Amino acid sequence: AQTVTQSQPEMSVQEAETVTLSCTYDTSESDYYLFWYKQPPSRQMILVIRQEAYKQQNATENRFSVNFQKAAKSFSLKISDSQLGDAAMYFCAYRSASSNYQLIWGAGTKLIIKP
Amino acid sequence: DVKVTQSSRYLVKRTGEKVFLECVQDMDHENMFWYRQDPGLGLRLIYFSYDVKMKEKGDIPEGYSVSREKKERFSLILESASTNQTSMYLCASSLTGNTDTQYFGPGTRLTVL
């Protein structure tokens, strides 16, 4: 069975600096998708970034980028120029290409932004 | 913008009560999901529906049932609430063909006393 591990329950970063959130996963499959979702305090969960396993190029979305290491089964999220609005729980998730809906979720990392 | 709404933000019920949690989406999405979110455990899928009257069990369906009589509405039912069902419940929806982008509701924090 696939598992997703986020080893950092909480991280903090100074405003305007860069922070990296870690995620590792375990799977025997070669075709899958990885995601980072963000859940701000008392607000809806939203998709931040998505990565297809067959793509070597790391996904980026503005200040958010990933470091996808397929062999190491690692999928970290880098947030550049951290802003107060980035404070949230961040969840890493995995989906097998053979499932069209089932996401396997990590436990989450709480990101604190220090002004 | 996609909007997913849940009937209550906070709910307090007694052990043994029947509890209904409702979720409504306004974007004609085929797929709807109910998750349970607990600290340190991430999100766990309770049930999934890919069409009206269609449902599939997720990872933790025990003690729960669901109903989807209309495309926009997906209800989670706790037939006899227990204290171990105290949790945050999240509803989500997605389009078939783009199931990776799930749109979430604000959540219902349920306390069972």
Image: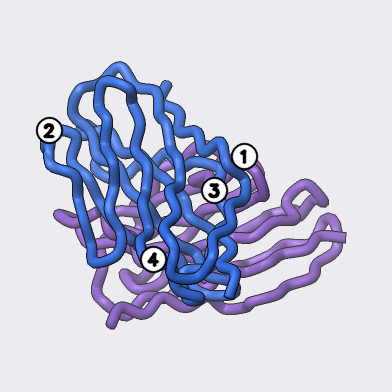
Chain colours: A blue, B purple
| Residue at (20, 22) in percent of width and height | A30
Looking at the image, do the residues carrying marks 4 and 1 touch, with CB atoms under 8 Å apart? no
Q: Secondary structure at mark 3?
A: loop
Question: Of the residues shown, which amino acid type is indicated by label 4?
Answer: Ile
Residue B54, percent from left and from top: 34, 52
Mark 1 belongs to which amino acid?
Answer: Glu
In the rendered structure, the residue with mark 2 lies on which chain?
A
Q: Earlier in the sequence, mark 3 or mark 4?
A: 4
Q: Which-is-in-front pick, marks 1 and 3?
A: 3
Determine the CA span between mark 3 and mark 2.
Answer: 25 Å
Q: Split into 4 quadrants, where in the image is the N terminus of chain B?
A: bottom left
Structural distance between the alpha carbons of marks 1 and 2: 36 Å
- Front-most of B25 and A95? A95
In primary-sequence order, the first of circles 2 and 4 is 4
Disc 1 designates what residue? Answer: B62
Residue B52 in view of the camera: no
Q: List x then y, in percent, for residue A3.
A: 45, 28
Question: Where is residue A55 drawn, in percent x and y?
Answer: 11, 37
Pick the residue in front: B84 or A107: A107
Tag nearer the camera, 4 or 1: 4
Is there a contact, CB below 8 Å, between mark 3 and mark 2? no
Determine which residue is flagged by label 3: A108
- Mark 3 and mark 2 lie on one chain; the one further toward the N terminus is 2
| Residue B26 point in image, percent of width and height | 32, 80
For mark 1, name the chain: B
SS at badge 2: loop
Measure the C-alpha gap from mark 4 to mark 1.
27 Å
Q: Which mark is residue A102?
A: none
> What separation in Å lies between label 1 and label 3 (alpha carbons)?
24 Å
Mark 2 closeness class: few <14, some 14–19, many ≥20 residues within 10 Å:
few
